[in-house]
Image (cartoon, rainbow, N blue to C red):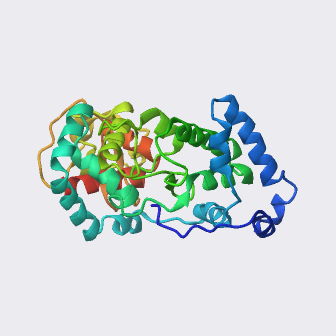
Amino acid sequence: MPMRRTLLTLTPALALAAAAPALAAQESFEAFLRGVSREAEGQGVSPALLRRAFADLAPNQRVLELDRRQAEFTLTWERYRDGRLVPQRIGQGRRMAEQHAELLQRISARYAVSPRIILAVWGLETNYGGFTGSFSTIQALATLAWDGRRRAFFRRELLAALQILEQGDVTPEKMRGSHAGAMGHPQFMPTSFQALAVDFDGDGRRDIWDSRADALASIAHYLSHHGWRGDERWGREVTLPPGFDTSQAGRDTRRPLRDWLSQGIAAADGSELPPLEMETSILLPGGPGGQAFAVYPNFHVIRRYNPSDFYALAIGLLSDQVG
């Protein structure tokens, strides 16, 4: 999850000197910005806005360090779960549920997404707005688009961020987020913001940085847009019968819930599961012998927010405890 970092501002000369030797042969950062400016102007971004957004801009070496480091970390399910489903986050979620009950109910009524799921996404993404990121979104995206590891992706996001600024939803100074360009309380990438951020408080701006109404409604709209089923759960922990064939586990094996129940799968909390036709998969995130989960269509919607089984399970489990 994104953590608040101190922004490292480098002069162009220092930034280029600090960059990896492999970057030496690529175009200069200034030439890159000129190319982006031409493309952005062709998409309706004004020269005045571009001058403001790119004023004194330089690559951010800390962004590059974090981008190259992220693939090195692998966590077991148990470590991932225990690092996120901590008492502080659960307790804060319950307090947020009470504090924003009226707002969450209005959002839920419009988008048919339960308040507990909205809270869980908010809690896991930014600790309920406590860690939204301190990197300049324009600087971070420009650095990553220039660096080249995922050049096309980050260039597209940078252009989208410039269009958002042109539309007036936020200023360059306020547009901040993670080192990878995810913004505000929901941690939306700029293209997701363009498509799915909403002005729920009606002030004429989609403000996911300072308006909790806009931020939480945007989370709900994102999930609703991707097919959230308002009257269904995300899934639940289950117990497996002796001799269960673990080769049947995995997201790609989807069968009616009644089929799994007929094999002896049961709810871990002892509650009775109705023999429904609901499409269900069995997940063993820690491998055979660990926790087992039956997951439903809403689980796959959560994965549209972040394509990780661990993430979607943590969201589901957190939602069960904060709502």
Residue at horizontal 40 percent and vertical 56 percent from the top? 125
Would you say 306 lies left or right of 217 here?
A: right
Q: How many marks?
A: 0
- Residue 179 position, x and y percent, is 56, 59
Above or below, comparing residue 10 to residue 45 in the picture? below
- Residue 201 position, x and y percent, is 29, 39
Would you say 69 lies left or right of 171 here?
A: right
Given the current orientation, which residue lies at the most extreme front position? 48
Above or below, comparing residue 132 to residue 145 in the picture? below
Above or below, comparing residue 186 to residue 22 in the picture? above
Q: Can residue 242 be seen at all in this image of the molecule? A: no
Above or below, comparing residue 315 to residue 168 in the picture? below
Would you say 137 lies left or right of 54 here?
A: left
Q: Quadrant of the N terminus?
A: bottom left
Residue at horizontal 41 percent and vertical 51 percent from the top? 209
Seen from the viewer's position, the closer of residues 145 and 51 is 51
Q: Can residue 191 be seen at all in this image of the molecule? A: yes
Residue 46 occupies quadrant: top right
Would you say 129 lies left or right of 56 here?
A: left
- Residue 151 position, x and y percent, is 70, 46
Residue at horizontal 54 percent and vertical 70 percent from the top? 6
Seen from the viewer's position, the closer of residues 72 and 23 is 23
- Residue 261 position, x and y percent, is 22, 41
